[in-house]
Image (cartoon, helix red, strand yellow):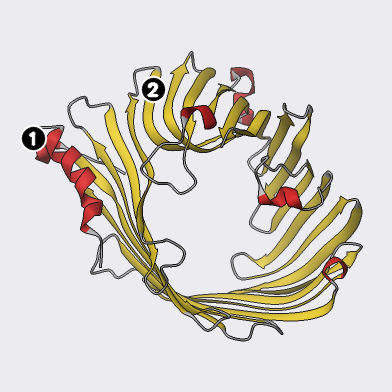
Amino acid sequence: MFKLKFLILPLILFSALTPDASAVGLSGNVIALGQGYRDYAGEDHFILAEGLRFHLQDFGVKPLSFHGYIQYYGDTKDDYTGNGKVRLYSGYLQYAAKDCPLSLKAGRMFLYRGVAVGVLDGGEIGYKINHQVSVTGFGGLSGPLSREWELEQPADAKMFGGEIRYTPLALRKFRANFALSYTHQERGGELMRHLAGLSCNFKLTRRWSSLNVLHLNLAASGLRKALTRWQYHSDKFRLSLEAAAIQPYFSAYSYFNDFEQVGMILRLKNTLEYHYIPQKWGLGLSSMLFASGESGLRIGPYVIFPYGRIGYHFSQGNQPNNNVLWGQLRWAVEDFIEIYAYAAAMEYEWAEMEIDTQETTMLNLGCSIRPPIVKGGAAGLEWQNYQTPEVDSDRRIIFNFRYNFNMGGANE
């Protein structure tokens, strides 16, 4: 049953911040997810997640808004994991006006600004200097991994940084955009991220676009990531080319530090599709050449047909070999209902784990419904079957429900 406590915070804000509740804009969505399965030890589980995402606008000061996401997560069959808690994933005030160059945020928010990725308990300030340059800075504490309502200790979770974005008018026909970012993040008193980054994306023509990224690890004075990706899109052809050099980056407290450190990973990826009849029939080929001390190649062709795709890819080289026959299906039975399926049969070898050959099968079947009688509503049901020589009873049933609402002056 949906937890009524989810409604407390938005209702308090809705009623207290304005005397005229009908003038306030309230929008968002209600989400419910459930997953039932039996684990390898024969124990039953039923995981339930109920969430409320909401946006409050037009209360008091018109450019001021409040945004939040609260979720209950728990395993109703197993209390060992300590689940069954209400978590605050985000909750922040935002000030933003179209005619004002200044923008402000305060509270718990998710950051994704170049090298700055994570949950911030603090504030962010942005200023648009002109049509070409904008500056953003943030500071506060790294949000707790548990997403509890409490804050981390200030001495153990410092987080600050910023971003400068530049859109040169001289390159406006290419829609070029440059961004310089920086972040310093700690958790438990240990340095988690100390990075600087530069990104550039542009559109050369109506069909060609490019993304380029450079991240530097300031703590180790080394390269963290260098990536360039080029894409071409037309009715008949689709092409993606990518080259990257990536250094795996683990925090000092990370569990993965107990393993042998991986060196720089070099990767070349490409995908080429030819659509004989657009959106119906075609052929594709994807490949990836990579190296990290040892090199390997993964390549696979696939066929595009009106209701899905089917393909095969295989591996060669000194890396773990993985050969996969796969297929996916999507069929819109009506405008409001769609059936989908995914199946894969894998055979792989992994010398480091002393696995010569192992076979794995996977099958997912599901449907999604958007009933016309429930405007803004959607539901889905999925069955999963996963089987290996060691595990032959992993069966899962997953359901989801989503309802979008928009009341008052809010416009989503």
The three-letter code of the residue at mark 1 reads: Asp
Please say if 96 is above or below 266.
above
Q: Quadrant of the C terminus?
A: top left
Q: Is residue 25 above or below residue 400?
A: above
Of the pair 412 and 48, the residue shown nearer to us: 48
Image x and y of residue 352, in percent: 86, 66
| Residue 59 in picture, x, y percent from top left | 18, 31
Left/right placement of residue 63 relative to residue 22 reads: right
- Kind of residue sitting beneath label 2: Ser
> In this figure, which residue is indicated by the disc labeled 1?
20
Task: Please name the residue shown 37% across and 32% down the image.
Answer: 107
Q: Is residue 66 left or right of residue 298?
A: left
Quadrant where the N terminus sits is: bottom left
Local crowd at mark 2 within 10 Å, few (<14), some, or many (≥20)?
A: some
- Residue 196's disc is none
Name the residue: 67% across, 38% down: 205
Which structural element holds mark 1?
Answer: loop
Q: Earlier in the sequence, mark 2 or mark 1?
A: 1
Residue 151 pos. (x, y %)? 41, 36
Instruction: Give the residue displayed 47% in from the left and 42% down from the top.
Output: 144
Q: In the figure, is residue 126 to the left or right of 205?
A: left
Give the residue at mark 2: 103
Residue 358, quarter of picture: bottom right
Q: Nearer the viewer, residue 236 or 30?
A: 30
Image vertical order of residue 109 relative to residue 242, above or below: above
Q: Position of residue 187 (x, y in %)?
A: 56, 36
Specify whether residue 365 is in view.
yes
